[in-house]
Amino acid sequence: MTPAARIAAAVDLLEVIEGAPKRPADAVANDFFRSRRYIGSGDRRAVSDRVWTILRGRRRIGWWLGNAPSSARLLVAASLLLEGWTKSGVQQAFSGGQFAAPPLDRAEAGALTRIEGHTIDHPTMPDAVRLEIPDWLLPRLTARFGASLPAEMAALSLPAALDMRVNLLKGDRDQAKAALAAEGWEADATRFSPWGLRIDGRRPVTSGPAFQSGLVEIQDEGSQLVAVMVGAAPGMRVADWCAGAGGKTLALASAMENRGQIVACDVSAPRLDGAVRRLRRAGVHNVERHLVETGDKWLKRRAGTFDRVLVDAPCTGTGTWRRNPDARLRLKETDLAELLPKQAGILDTAQSLVRKGGCLVYATCSLLEEENEAQVTSFLLRHPDFAVVPLDRSWPLEQPPPNSGAFLSLTPARHGTDGFFTAVLERTA
């Protein structure tokens, strides 16, 4: 594709994303490129990179443009404010020639003139706009991070590296590193996870033999550390209560060396079905799947029989904005209000599976205190037969934990991972 054709495709993709505000942008983009197979892999990457750059700066770009800017105006503004284009360069890209975007209309040309020569930040921007967060979240995140909030939000606006977890059922980290090197990918050991490897930037590793053979699985280092905190060992009985498509289930099976039993539970049959292929590729055979349904008698039959129960609860996902910058645009205060009782209900249900002396491990990919520490505090008031196992006791690795305090608390700025929270709660009676 010519540069002008890439610009036109980016305008089209951005328009589709803006027109589907309730759908994740990556899902919209997948459909967009699937229906345009003539766009090659390099062009797809260039188009999506430009659109994702706009999504990361969407609030600030919108501040410059005013209410409801068109996709073309967003791209014009991003070209000037973020990429350093000149006015004439933008006009050439919007030439209206073959495969190029139509010429700028009067409003778009006016925006071009008004913005030329500026950078994206401006001293009169409201704090929430400058930090690229919803207005209603600003006081919550300020209370949590204080003076470090700008650094934390800046880290959340950067693209994430590609993290992989080595499947110990297939080989060790050195073997995986060598296998990736043979494919042309240089990977480094992650800072905290003993199973992790990291490659800078997005790379098509899923088409290579290391991934296809099940030696590596794509998983953020923070997510790997949640599985580490479970402390699953060979021979244990473990329930992954919100298993989804099985990312953490796979990590638990690897840590347990395929010995013992894991039950992957979820309320969604399609998500559980999606785990089958991943489990097969990884060589996992100590996992059974269970669909959680209303009036489920399985829960009563298995009460008090598990050594570990992991609850990776549905949450706002505020810790994953590096990967999902559009999510911050879609998140509403009502979403948080709906999630909090749901999280509490899931904890109240899952705790019944834990045996005396066993542990309930609660995790979210959220940065919000209401979903994390406050949720644990409320749970302990309802269930006094559980107690927090502080991080200095629950951290299972020889190296020091990433943070101090009672709970594992990860952020992109401090740890280079997605934002994650993990609490280990032991049943004492």
Image (cartoon, helix red, strand yellow):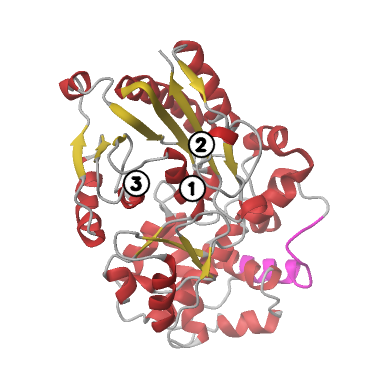
Measured from the top left, where is residue 295 in percent x and y? 18, 19
Location of mark 1 (residue): 225
Residue at image coords 59%, 40%: 409
Q: Are marks 2 and 1 in contact (CB under 8 Å)?
A: yes
Q: Does residue 166 appear to the left or right of 373 in the view shown? A: left
- Which quadrant would residue 392 be assigned to in this image? top right
Q: Are marks 3 and 1 in contact (CB under 8 Å)?
A: no
Q: Could you say whether the residue bearing mark 3 is in a helix, strand or loop?
A: helix
Per the model, the C-alpha gap separating discs 3 and 2 is: 15 Å
Per the model, the C-alpha gap separating discs 3 and 1 is: 11 Å
Q: Quadrant of the C terminus?
A: top left
Q: Amino acid at mark 3?
A: Leu
Per the model, the C-alpha gap separating discs 2 and 1 is: 9 Å
Location of mark 3 (residue): 252
Q: Could you say whether the residue bearing mark 1 is in a helix, strand or loop?
A: helix
N-term-proximal mark, 3 vs 2: 3
Measured from the top left, where is residue 175 in percent x and y? 39, 72
Which segment is the magenta one? 106-122
N-term-proximal mark, 3 vs 1: 1
